[in-house]
Image: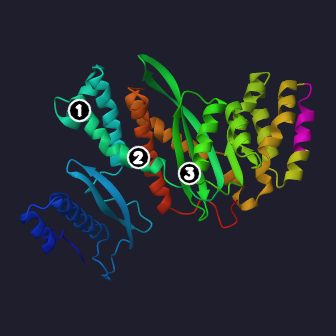
Amino acid sequence: MLDQPQANISLPENLISAIINGQENAVTSTLQFIFNEVMKIERELHLKAGAYERVSDRQGHSNGFKSKTFLTSNGPLQLSIPQVRDSSFYPSTIEKGSRSEQSLKLAIAEMYIQGVSTRKVAAIVFELCGKEISSTQVSNLSARLDGELEKFRSRQLGEIGTLYLDARYEKVRLDGVVIDVAVLVATGINGEGKREVLGVSIMISEAEVHWREFLNSLTKRGLTGVKLIVSDDHAGLKAARKSVFPSVPWQRCLFHYCQNAQAYVPKVSMREEIAQSTRDIFNCASKDEAQQKLKTVVEKYKTTASSYANWLENSAHEVMTFYDFDRSIWKKIRTINFQERLNREIKRRTRVVGVFPNIQSLLRLVTALLIETHEDWSIGNKYLSDKGV
């Protein structure tokens, strides 16, 4: 059993020769080698067993490596992150979420450059670059990240059976004025049944023209095979969806629909009753049964909650699309809940900044967070079974 770190890492002869001869990138290549070797040792210590070692108290099994670009002051390192089956193991040698951490710090550094002087800004700037920081330093730091992030945003896409769309708002300083901008995010389920982050864009609003531009950008990057779109109800998105994907069925998010129902409750004492009545419609075993239940609920509230009854009668069909697919995946395709969780994670990080100094800094941070989520999904379990959309 491996009890102590094997710290005596030997450099390969080609690296030693490169250092001696002062070859270009010799330092970067050496750091890359050392990082990769140390991470292997960390995994062995975590598993309490060396490679291929059979011991009784082994704490799991290796599961290959995942490639990752790690940005350093000496340039980008192409690392191989050791993976462990059924474990949250991550080597402490490098900082998990390094892209998002650097993006966050850059956003705050840009605030500092623009004259936003607070103790929080000063503290993070000190951690990032020392006591003083210039616009040139900020520009150089951002250049290291932006190329990698843009590659992700513009990468080629493929067949996606289910497309999920959502948006959230963040505050940005634009031309000396603080405005709310829309962060449009698209995710989807690929042919392997796994989730992917497909794209992100920062727009002035959720107007049809902005959603249409975003959806067109996805198709230009190769998005095909969409059989179902899941989203909340929004006029701009609805119009854009019909324009770009005119024949694709739409599932209105059930979770948000049930929340919307509360706007039509005539008095507080009826809130829970109407909430349950709404849920009952979409918990039926079939579409026919749901439609019959809908008629019953509409009839029940025609006199006591007429606005609710009319709204339900005119809109409930938008939430029943999931019934047309295999029952095993109903819960996964009738809401955008997992994307809501993604939004909460974005909010957790963006609230640190508050008001972003410009749109690019917001896009940088959100993209970095989405890449990390995308990578986690790629090595995780299937989201939809083989009977998926």
Front-lying residue, 270 or 44: 44
Task: Check if mark 3's residue and mark 1's residue have beta carbons within 8 Å.
Answer: no
Sequence-wise first label, 2 or 3: 2
Q: Is residue 188 shown left or right of residue 251?
A: left
Which structural element holds mark 1?
Answer: helix
Question: Element type at marker 3?
Answer: loop
Q: CA distance from mark 2 to mark 1?
A: 20 Å
For marks 3 and 1, the one nearer the N-term is: 1
x then y, percent, for residue 331:
69, 53
Q: Overall secondary structure of the magenta stretch?
A: helix
Farthest-out residue, top? 176
Q: What residue does disc 1 label?
A: 136
In the structure shown, which secondary structural element does the residue marked by tag 2 occupy?
A: helix
| Mark in front: 2 vs 3 | 3
Question: In x, y percent, where is residue 322?
Answer: 76, 52
Magenta-highlighted residues: 293-303
| Distance between the alpha carbons at the discs numbered 3 and 1 | 33 Å
Residue 221 - label: 3
Residue type at mark 2? Leu
Q: Is residue 294 magenta?
A: yes
**Furthest residue in direction left, as rendered:** 20
Q: Residue at x 82, y 51 (%)?
A: 284
User: Three-letter amino acid code at disc 1?
Assistant: Thr
- The earlier-in-sequence mark between 2 and 1 is 1
